[in-house]
Image (cartoon, rainbow, N blue to C red):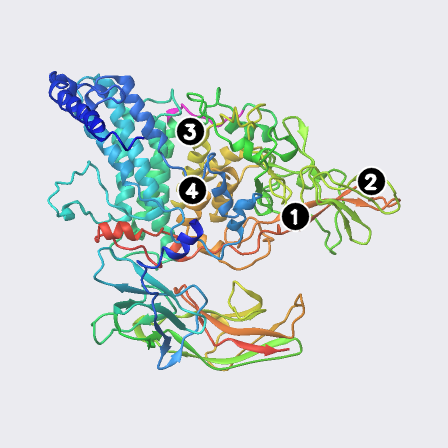
Amino acid sequence: MGIAASLVSCNYDNYEEPSFQLDGRIVYQGEPIGVSYNDVYIELWESGWQRLGNIGVAVDQDGSYSSLLFKGDYKMIIPNNQGPFRKITNDQSGNDTIPVNLTGSRTMDIEVMPYYMIRNTNISSGNSQVTATFDLEQIITGDDAKDIQEVFLYVSKTSFVDNRTSIANTTIGVEDLELSSISLAVTIPEIVPTQNYVYARIGVRIDGVEDMIFSEIVKVDL
Amino acid sequence: MCHSNKPERTMKNLKYIYLVIFLAFTGCSNDEFLNREPTDILGGDQVWANDDLVFSVMADLYNRLPDYQGLENWWEYASFDETFASNAGDYWRHQNQEYGYGDWGMWDYGLIRDLNLFIQKCEVATEISTESKTRFLAEAKFIRAMVYFEHVKRMGGVPLILEPLEYDYSGDPTYLQYPRAKEHEVYDFVIAEMEAVKDDLPNGSTRSRATKGAALALISRAALYAGSIANYGQLTPEVSLPGGEVGIPAAMAAGYYAAALKASEEVIALGTYELYDQDPNKSENYSNIFLNKSSNNEIIMAKDFLVQGRTHGFTIDNIPRSLREENTSGGKMNPSLNLIQSYELLDNTFAELPTMDASGNPLYYDDPMDIFAGRDPRLLGTVIVPGSSFRGKEVDIWAGYKLEDGSVISSGQLGGQAQLPGSDTSVQVVGFDGPIDQLEWSAQNGFYLRKYVDTSVGSGQRGTGSAVWLVRFRYAEILLNAAEAAYELDQLEKAAEYMNQVRRRAGFPIDLTPGEIDFDRIVHERKVELAFENHILWDKKRWRLAHRIWNGVTTDLTNNPGNALAVSTRVFGLKPFKYYEPGSPNNGKWLFEEFVPAPVFNAHRFRLGNYYSWIGDNVRNNNPKIVRNPNQ
């Protein structure tokens, strides 16, 4: 009886689950900005409710985000000091709030100004080492420019690659850093259980910015 | 049958209706019926006519003082790198990928309102003596300052509400919405308020109620915090808000350090307090600072127990497994090797525990306690190490037999037995206290806590519990506050003298010279003297060290325990083994191995957004003037 009631009784008053997908990437001139997982958040606010609360949307490692939502008018913000970039003034709102009118599923990239971009990345393996070569391009110059603190090459067993999950990493500090033709190499430790591949990417820590910027994750066969 | 007699039922119902009508008209003939005094609660006028009743209201306010870490919530001690939680329900503390933004948050305007009401009513009370009134007022202001201090160190600046607010039911509550004060304004309030009431409070005579010493101790601590936020906040410019709700201007640092030094020296000059120094054994002496409640002039303020029979279960939770007095629980806090190796050698130098020689071979010891020999006596006063005794009985901590080939013979049961090679009889192969991987409520990482664990028999039983008090302010902290403030003001002679007083009492034969006092020394001395006293989080926050030492990176135990910046994201343990190789000179000797307890598999990560806790959406919905904390 109770089971029967529990099976039938919730039919009436429930909403349909949200069905519109809002997704996209955080980009600079169309190129995605890599970040570490669960560290950078976008907030979606919907006005018209008695109480305000936001829908937090985590940005994935490759700079992408997605959320299933109801139809409605949303305001999208990236909270201050989130991410290795500065926000861009939105044409419509005149500030950093991005209005999102959702009438159906939609893909929307968010343009931002990163402090640096990692360019021409090439990650390969050989001699039980992972080697990366890349260039760094300073995007924000002038008063808002920030220095690089450290550059890392991270190697992970899984496709989560940052300082929390890496099994090996190597670094160069700012004093030895030229922005072009940077080369980093790290020896791969013994992996238990054995696997014949690893994941790797470059991470750049910028002075006074909590979130690092990362290159694309590369699966390297050993 | 019962359906048949309809008219009779109606008649019966009518009778009741008449009875009710009759009672309604007659029952209230006496107007006093509705105006009787309640017999189960006291009205405001009654309370404020009697010292004892006011005092019982005050007792409730004292009782509501919050302690982030304390004897009634031991688990919060395990949130950082001081101790491993040998309790399955708390393993998550070693497995989280980061601290939540809401952790250690607080927004308790209910308590602040009750304090404001108390102060308002006390100010107009006419039935109690002026003398009691002055003291009650000063005490309430002390508690209120404590509560604001508690808020500001967790949240940054909060609205300073100093009188009870009343809603006028007009439908427009905006006049009740106050913005956050600047962070320094809350510290300024705490300091000024305590300066104003300190002379209305008695000097000494109680440790559960506010005294002049407690008011000065609060100034000492609050001013030191404000000074260091102003000073070290420069290292993290992102941790600030444009309105000053978070962050204190660097120029204010010197003023706060001077205030902290002055207040500390006033406590010293009171002459009421002194360092506890009564036992010839310095380790025992250190333990007794927290256990001796009868003749102890070190304690300035404590949350006392055994008042009206109230006790706590800290000893039930933390007593060594083999000595426990109940058939459950025990041994939950296992102080970390990170902390243990931080205790200096007696010549004032730092060293790891010597487990291996230079070429990587294990070192063998005759007695398990030998590896801890020659260290700061506070180590054995804080921690129960393998081979040491508690309540007169030796604890039995050893991980198993180590054979010549490096293999281990152990058991999955406390005190379990197995056969050693070449023998057909079973012998005990692991201690009755552990360590055994994943076995909770025992010395899973090789250590037990001694500090605050009650030595009196019965305190480990649920029916009785422990009456050990929770120390909130003690003289040694005041000396260390003075030392730190003096150091920051470049008065190194003074800094050395105050710090050496604490170190001499601890049992160090050689003083530190003024030239040896540096930031690392300040950080280190507080780490070991004030371990498990609810200082670690606030200290690491105000020095802006938290995001550097708990940086989320899986890092090995530091080789340099004296370094304030050493990363310490995981709690380590130490396994003692007995060596088994009949015929070898090392047979039966002890060797040790560092290890990470199995439940510890993620590194502590303190993000910039953790410096000031998350203010709930409900708070900001009710009051849109409240700005969010940074980096969240």
* Cα separation between marks 4 and 3: 23 Å
Q: Which chain is home to disc 3?
A: B
Q: Which chain is home to disc 1?
A: B
> In the displayed structure, does residue B521 sit left or right of residue B485?
right
Magenta run includes residue A54: no
Q: Which residues are magenta?
A: B270-277
Residue B312 or residue B469, whichever sits in front? B312
The quadrant of the picture occupied by the N terminus of chain B is top left
> In the displayed structure, does residue B230 sit left or right of residue B372?
left
Which residue corresponds to the image point at 17% horizontal and 45% vertical from the top-left? B176
Q: Position of residue B564 (x, y in %)?
A: 50, 50
Q: Quadrant of residue B62?
A: top left
Amino acid of disc 4: Glu
Element class at badge 2: strand
* Cα separation between marks 1 and 4: 41 Å
Q: Position of residue B413 (x, y in %)?
A: 70, 42
Q: Which residue is mark 4?
A: B484
Q: Earlier in the sequence, mark 1 or mark 2?
A: 2
Q: Which mark is residue B302?
A: 3
Q: Which mark is residue B426?
A: 2
Q: Earlier in the sequence, mark 3 or mark 2?
A: 3
